[in-house]
Amino acid sequence: MVVLDATIVNIALPHIQEALEFSTTDLTWVVSSYTLTFGGLLLLGGRAGDILGRRRVFMTGILLFTLASLLGGLAQEPWQLLAARVLQGVGGAIASPTSLALITTTFPEGPERNRAFGVFAAVSAGGGAIGLLAGGMLTEWLDWRWVLFVNVPIGVLIAVLTPLYISESERHSARFDIAGAVTSTAGMASLVYGFIRAADEGWKDRLTIGSFAAAVLLLLAFGVIESRAKEPITPLRMFADRNRSGTYVIMLSLAAAMFGMFFYIVLFVQNVLGYSPIQAGLAFLPVTVVIALGAGLSQRFLPVLGPKPFMLVGSALAMTGLAWQALISSDSSYVGGVLGPMLVFGFGMGLNFVTLTLTAVSGVAPHEAGAASGLLNTTQQVGGSLGLSILTTVFGTATKNEAEKQLPQFMAEGTAEQKAEFARTHQLPAPWGHEVLAHGISTAFIPAAAMAVLALATAWLVIRVRKSDLEALSGSAGPGLG
């Protein structure tokens, strides 16, 4: 449901923008308000499952997510939708890490757990595919609000079925690191806000500078709190193994590129290519197929080859796809400008998903499974929010420059009706507006490709495969990746 919700909302973004009058840069908060809260509180959610019982915590998160979806569908103002998305993030953060922890503790390390994570990845890919199609159909046939309302019956059904199929886990006595959760979430929110504010107001704006300063202070405070806490929300010993640390960096970098890519390609296919929501959903469907293929391939051969080859090849393919998308223009076709690079990128991500997940949680003690899986999810969500904000800063600057370039031609060639519309909305109409949007998107993909380069360099220089790693993945008695 969490994966489905993200893809459903992405398809509906252009309609949400029009209905609630978001600017393109402010529209990123529809994504970031969810992912920031989700990522920032995931570790607390994982810890809650360890301490209070995973089934109880899982159901609480699902019900909260369901309520937030209902409120978001009823939103009449931008702030109401963003508040609901924040609440959705809280619910997802409570429920999501519990599901991965249940897999980690239920299946023994080796082939059985590999298969379980393969199924988990396939379900995630399937949820993404269903979300793309359902989002297109609901938006076009009903209204964008139904992309949120649809979570209500799903959430209720999950809450009813959970007690029948999931046993309650053993509870552990421990403390909640509230201070760590608050400072980390607030620090990342300030950092993301600073980048998005810079896209609109520039780097010299006082609020932009203040946001970055607050981010630095809050994240430093988070580091101090975690180093002194008896039971920190982020156990620093998780980073002691170079393979696990490298895995977190790779996930952070690739997620940063991926979130930005999907956000801007959705805008491109609907606003430049003129696709309907259903057509946009179908346009992204092949990507979920190649992600599932890549995940299945890595799951099958991981015990033989180890994680490093899949990280290297997957990151290289992601980098290639993003660099290809940096060539996009208003004249690009779907096949050459969108589908081709997305297939390359998607297959690379598929090779990485199962690989990174297994590397991050292997060798972790059962009572810390929630923290380990939550930390991996946190790097993905926080990386996505941070990456989208960075791409938005680049996009905002590029579109402003291109709009100034296109404006004289529009004033010379535009009709009276087009000029009147421009005076009302301050948005250039097609074809000038298409040029502005495409130029901003292509420029934003340059830093996205650089993020994939960082992932590739980390896989090459940091990841080391030992014999014990392969033994653990194949089910032999070895210490694993920890």
Image (cartoon, helix red, strand yellow):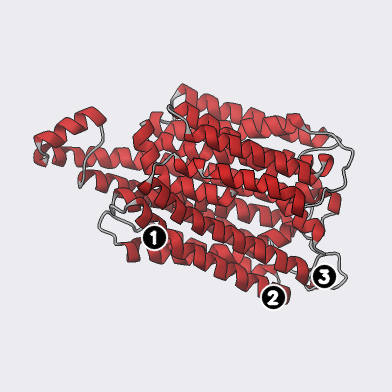
* Type of amino acid under label 3: Ser
Residue at 53% x, 47% y: name it.
5
The mark nearer the N terminus, 1 or 3, is: 1
Contact, CB < 8 Å: mark 1 with mark 3? Answer: no
Residue at 29% x, 62% y: name it.
333
Q: Which mark is residue 332?
A: none
Residue at 72% x, 77% y: name it.
304
Q: Is residue 329 above or below residue 436?
A: below
Please state the horizontal and vertical placement of residue 459, each as a whole percent of the image: 63, 62
Q: Which mark is residue 305?
A: 2
Please state the horizontal and vertical placement of residue 400, each as a whole percent of the image: 31, 37
What's the CA distance linking mark 1 and mark 2?
33 Å
**In screen coordinates, is 217 left or right of 277?**
right
Disc 2 element: helix
The residue that label 3 is drawn on is: 468
* Type of amino acid under label 2: Leu
The residue that label 1 is drawn on is: 283
